[in-house]
Image: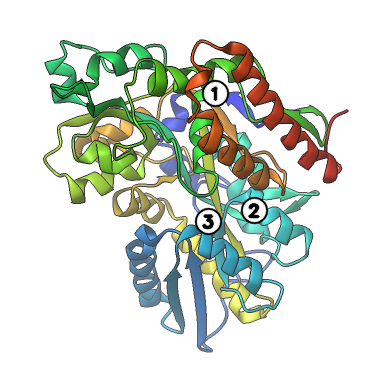
Amino acid sequence: MASKKAVSSGLAGVLVLSAMLSGCSGGGEPAPAGGNAQGGGGQPADQAVSLSIWTGWPELDPYFKKMAEEYKKTKPNVSIEVSSFPLRDYEKKVAAALPSKSAADILPLNPNLALRYIEGGLIQTTPEDLVKYVNSGIHEKLIVDTTSVNGKPYGVPSFMGAGAIYYNKDMLKEAGLTEPPNVDNLLEYAQKLAKRDASGNLERAGMSLRLSGGGSGVGEKFWNLLAQRGGSIVKEVSPGKYTANYNTEEGYQTLKLYVDMVHKFKTDDPKLKHDTEAFQTNLAAFYIRESNVIMDTKKKAPDLNYDAAPLKANVISLINYYVSSTDKAKAEAAWDFIRFLTKPENHKQIITMSGWLPARNDLDLNDVYKEYPQYKAFFVKQDLQMYPPLPEFDEILTKFADRLATKGFTDPSFVDNPDKMKAFLNDAAKETNDILKKAGRLAE
């Protein structure tokens, strides 16, 4: 199944291990530059080197540009150009550029997406010192597992997305609710917090759901709610063999929650604004979203009185750093810059500069919590899941998301009709299994 494990509060990043790790062999900070590419740093000599890094997250531009400037102070011969694109455009650009050897030298990628390029020999293996760093105990095992493919090391963990329940404190107080929402009372709270005008039209959603949108986002949000019941999109039945895992009781209950909110109790409406925009403009009382909301809200709604509550489980969206360049000087400089990015004091800045979470558990975040208490919700004991190691999983999730957005969430006849909802899930699961079968990965 999708990787899943119980994690302790160590994931919280509040364990101050960096000092301990730095004093141990293979500790939490990469080895300093110097030596050869496979042993201890691999920084080229004084020749000028121009590196490029692409991303699909424009909010990371300030972070990478600052890191490039700081790095150049100690390595003046290395210049780093940072370019970002909308995520889907970035993925298309990488897919076109890697085979023609015209991609950026450093590519932050979801390891699931990187699989196809690794299997095609288009991504460079990780130097030995960084392999030791990755395996030093500062990452959860399911994160470390993504950096090994067919027994070879690829990639270094960068940042991750994870969900929490954001809620408007003023709206809860107005409704007489003294406790934050949790995964067991979402429908109850949605009913109590939805607001209607004199004609009965919904003007404020209780819980803002992800009902539409491009790509696999709709599927990811469904998956996160499904995970609260212990479900997943696919499960591994035997090594390398999978089957759909949402046409289950857990999947039915998750779909029923959407149907009840939209069509039965009408606590959300596709006609309303949704997601972060709705929350920031007081058109939704609560919703589930990743950590980058915190910094975005600081900019767009600095006076919003809100907090975040933890989920029982989380679906991590992980991004690793990969190097594509076959040029020796560029590759060595690229890996050295990754060493610089993953120094604890530098890696930590990704939180307050972009809102994303460093994919490691050895950072002291008490100063971050003091200024942004909402981050605490992301660092509690939870069950974790991740994208499974299937190159075709994005296709699976995207097609399932399209079915949800065009049928699963739009059909009012699903209300109190479990047979219809289960038939819908079975039809979607057949498509998922057909994709797995075509790829030779279906458990039969």
Residue located beneath label 2 in the image = 113
Drawn side of residue 319 relative to residue 146, left or right = left
Residue 149, image x and y in percent?
75, 50
Residue 332, image x and y in percent?
60, 73
Q: CA distance from mark 2 to mark 1?
A: 23 Å
Residue 275, image x and y in percent?
34, 39
- The nearer-to-camera label among 2 and 3 is 2
Which secondary structure lies at badge 2? Answer: helix
Q: CA distance from mark 1 to mark 3?
A: 37 Å
Residue located beneath label 3 in the image = 30
- The nearer-to-camera label among 1 and 3 is 1
Label 2: how many residues lie within 10 Å, few (<14), some (14-19) or many (20+)? some
Lower position in the chain sequence, tag 2 or tag 1? 2
Q: Residue at x 58, y 31 (%)?
A: 385
On the rendered image, what quadrant is the N terminus found in?
top right
Residue located beneath label 1 in the image = 226
Residue 49, image x and y in percent?
52, 84
Label 3: how many residues lie within 10 Å, few (<14), some (14-19) or many (20+)? many
Q: Is residue 440 visible?
A: yes
Which secondary structure lies at badge 3? Answer: loop
Drawn side of residue 54 relative to residue 439, left or right = left
Q: Identify which amino acid the numbered label 1 is placed on.
A: Leu
Drawn side of residue 385 relative to residue 185, left or right = right
Lower position in the chain sequence, tag 1 or tag 3? 3
- The nearer-to-camera label among 2 and 1 is 1
Q: Residue at x 39, y 20 (%)?
A: 261
